């Protein structure tokens, strides 16, 4: 692994930064701000021709004045100075670079192509491996290193993200935080002039912090290498790709973004299938799938159960299950009787189990999951119906002193029951996925369940789609590993 | 219209409430709390056998003690007392009721069926029209009346929602607020024992506050009547349905929820098509579509433009457009030259127009939309790339006193440019839909654009899907109205 340049690039002990100043209007400044304020504990050396300090750090006139040899050079300078800076870095002995600067191959212009070729020539001369140009850099949540524009605010997770778009590793960070989607690492690959998608795939395949790999792709540059590398990885680690270069408009747009030579959708779909790579048709689909794949055990078959306190969303789930190839077996008579005994009289004991409006968290988070998850003909559970404290707090806000609401008592019961829910997927080695219209920012219970490793999706359909991907990956894994499961 | 019982039911001058107390554990209490704290200015009379006041309002021993004849009775009492309460209401002269109480036809039991038949008999005797049983009541945002469990916190909008699920008009309210989805009115129809979906459809067809109708359906109870009524409405007002009873699992689950006799998916799909009803395959899809339909003009064709400051999301949009049957014409040479003059040199002047990282809100919100929206071969615009003040505030939080950020100046420029964007759809009579990973809660600019009537979707794909529905509805409308458009 250490031969892969990404190992050191993702874990630099020190960074020389070119292109920040003490003004926010300098394009490099927000990048440096994010690096020094994101929790990174390595050394950062701003290089600036005039300033004594940059953002509070001692600044250096040029790369030769640096007190030590940095592992990595980070460049957000104008295109005409990139070569000079790189040449100096090469002479100093720096062997890794991230080049944010744009205006290369992606412009389609002769000048851009020429500039990119000049980059290649120079870096080859000094043996420099580099990311970009026209990229946003990297995120490594394990060491708090985030070179992009937006802060990474969620806890470290287990999804490795390879993105041909810088926007998706910056502007999407608030989305990840809101949906409880934890990244291990992310790489914005830009024009892939040197380090490319395959290098990243290899790196993530070996990275112990990464349990699922997400790829946003406008083109697959070296298809044969991609196929071989993906084939190696997918039997052990799921790879989900969102490929947008397959339509006429997608391909044309991609060409002017990262000079991507995009190709026929059907051919790519076939390649992904052959490589055991899962395909997502939208950004939320990709991360919904990766979150489930990274956090939950795989189902052994396609037979699901649904548990709820809300009819409509559960029926939506049931309908969506059938559309995705998931089955909802009827419960056996004995189980129905057991369930009937503990649910309200108007409630439905069948699959879906609908306890209707009910205040007892023990029932829906503990007693019923313990019965359902234990059934030999049930491979996993979908749960819609989290009423956390937000639900009560809403009412307290409305109620004022008109009526008393025992929120502490209820919150405590909720918390206890949820602990039991969270342990159920481990105890039964079967996946649980939840859905709730409230998010983790609104509701402690949602947060507790998510932090316990059970994804909580914002709508019923998204939980079902993610479950369908878990099932599809279990089939891929079985095929590659020679293991066969019995279905139904 | 006044013959339709929903007219008075949605606009009661006074409500007799049965089933609340001064304890939050009484199931009716949260409903009453929501009614009296939601802004409703009509009279509310709690009826309670023992209490002198309920939630601060004078309480009445029985319906005969009420100081006047209420327009509407609201019942959340136990099933065994429903008939007694209704009988008294009938004698008093009340002719409208909402029955929340469950345990009727939806249970599938003989007892449930019998109870529902008894309800029919009694209400027929007194000429009472009623909603339910097994429902959550209504929301009328124009008069601040919300009988459900959750508060309605967003501004009134123009979507009328008919729901066979009570959960979707309660638990989804925070979702509506978060996504800037404004309702005019909502009806939870429950078992539809008396007032049914067709009555609601008729009512919304005539309701001037409602510009688009959303229907969550587990069954279509009177298919011929539905078809006829929908055919009347859809040439003038769009109707979007989410039907979940068409699969085996969906139908079975629906049967135990609202005793729905669900039916074959393909037959229903055909009926919806014949009626000019648009079909959504998920809850977010339905409301994404309704929001666009309610707020934006229709495109005259399928030729779109994309404007962005972020490559990846714009390419995602381009790819999604082609998959949805939308085209992205190349701009003419003259237009490309005009655009080139005002965008940065590395930016792309074609369709998509990608200005790349750029701080000038005037460019993306005003100058470019004014050029693009005016093109005769462009029917509408998709915009990804809102960097509102949140983006800067993030940086200010990070920066502390390390670097100065002129947030007031930038916010002001942003606000001014956005006003121009918001007026563009009116000036050019073409739709604009936006996407941004930040929501209205995070960002004033998103809020400003949404409050100006331009939906801002949380991901690029959702904006495209909503645009595709606008186009599909324009085709339906043209077909029904005998107007023909030229495409491409």
Image (cartoon, coloured by chain):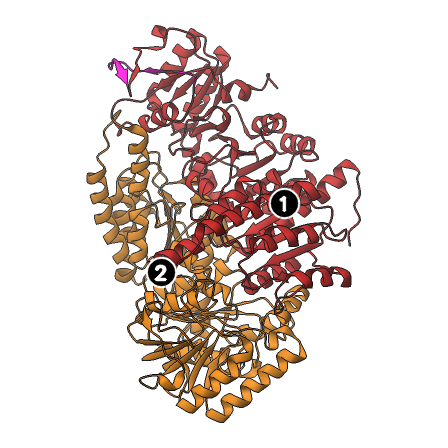
Chain colours: A red, B orange
**Which residue is more in the foreground, A178 or B486?**
A178
Quadrant assignment for the C terminus of chain B: bottom left
In reply to whether residue A223 is colored magenta, the answer given is no
Q: Can you see residue B113?
A: yes
Quadrant assignment for the N terminus of chain B: bottom left
Residue A269 is labelled as 1
In screen coordinates, is A458 left or right of A482?
Answer: left
In screen coordinates, is A441 left or right of A226?
Answer: left
**Which residue is more in the foreground, B14 or A10?**
B14
Q: Is residue A183 above or below residue B84?
A: above
- Report the residue at 63% width, 81% height from top: B113
Q: Which residues are magenta?
A: A41-54
Q: Position of residue B57 (x, y in %)?
A: 32, 71
Q: Position of residue A416 (x, y in %)?
A: 56, 45
Q: How many marks?
A: 2
Q: Earlier in the sequence, mark 2 or mark 1?
A: 1
In reply to whether residue A49 is colored magenta, the answer given is yes
Q: Position of residue B418 (x, y in %)?
A: 26, 50
Q: Secondary structure at mark 2?
A: helix
The residue labelled by disc 2 is A399
- Report the residue at 44% width, 89% height from top: B90
Q: Chain of mark 1?
A: A
Task: Give the label, 2 or 1, closer to the camera.
Answer: 2
**Which residue is more in the foreground, B212 or B127?**
B127
In screen coordinates, is A352 left or right of A395?
Answer: right
């Amino acid at each position: 692994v250490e031969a892969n340049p990404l190992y050191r690039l993702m874990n630099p002990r020190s960074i020389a930064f070119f292109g920040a100043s003490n003004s926010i209007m300098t394009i490099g400044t927000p990048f440096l701000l994010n690096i020094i304020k994101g929790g990174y504990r390595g050394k950062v050396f701003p290089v600036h021709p005039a300033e004594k300090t940059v953002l509070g750090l001692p600044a250096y006139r040029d790369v030769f004045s640096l007190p030590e040899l940095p592992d990595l050079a980070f460049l957000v300078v104008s295109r005409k100075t990139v070569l000079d800076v790189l040449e100096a870095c090469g002479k100093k002995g720096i062997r890794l670079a991230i080049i944010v600067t744009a205006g290369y191959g992606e412009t389609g212009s002769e000048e851009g192509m020429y500039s990119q070729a000049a980059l290649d020539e120079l870096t080859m001369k000094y043996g420099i491996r580099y990311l970009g140009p026209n990229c946003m850099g990297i995120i490594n949540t394990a060491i708090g290193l985030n070179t992009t524009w937006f802060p990474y605010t969620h806890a470290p997770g287990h999804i490795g993200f390879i993105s041909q778009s810088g926007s998706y590793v910056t502007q999407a960070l608030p989305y990840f935080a809101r949906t409880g989607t934890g990244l291990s690492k992310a790489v914005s690959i830009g024009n892939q002039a040197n380090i490319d998608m395959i290098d990243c795939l290899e790196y993530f395949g070996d990275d112990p912090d990464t349990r699922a790999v997400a790829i946003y792709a406008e083109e697959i540059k070296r298809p044969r290498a991609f196929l071989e590398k993906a084939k190696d990885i997918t039997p052990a680690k799921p790879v989900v790709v969102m490929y947008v270069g397959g339509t006429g408009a997608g391909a044309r747009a991609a060409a002017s973004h990262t000079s991507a030579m995009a190709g026929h959708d059907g051919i790519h779909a076939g390649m992904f299938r052959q490589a055991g790579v899962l395909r997502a048709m939208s950004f939320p689909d990709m991360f919904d799938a990766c979150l489930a794949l990274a956090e939950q055990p795989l189902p052994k078959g396609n037979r699901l159960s649904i548990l709820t306190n809300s009819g409509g969303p559960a029926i939506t789930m049931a309908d969506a299950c059938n559309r995705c190839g998931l089955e909802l077996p009827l419960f056996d008579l004995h189980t129905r009787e057991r369930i009937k005994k503990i649910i309200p009289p108007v409630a439905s004991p069948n699959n879906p189990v609908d306890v209707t409006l009910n205040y007892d968290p023990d029932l829906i988070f503990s007693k019923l999951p313990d019965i359902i998850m234990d059934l030999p003909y049930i491979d996993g559970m979908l749960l819609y119906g989290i009423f956390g404290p937000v639900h009560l707090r809403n009412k307290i806000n409305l109620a004022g002193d008109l009526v008393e609401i025992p929120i502490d008592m209820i919150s405590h019961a909720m918390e206890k029951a949820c602990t039991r829910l969270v342990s159920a997927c481990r105890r039964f080695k079967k996946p649980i996925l939840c859905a709730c219209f409230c998010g983790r920012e609104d509701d402690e219970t949602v947060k507790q369940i998510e932090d316990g490793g059970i994804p909580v999706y914002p709508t019923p359909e998204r939980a079902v789609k993610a479950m369908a991907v878990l099932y599809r990956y279990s089939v891929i894994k079985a095929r590659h590993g020679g293991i066969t499961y019995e279905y139904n």
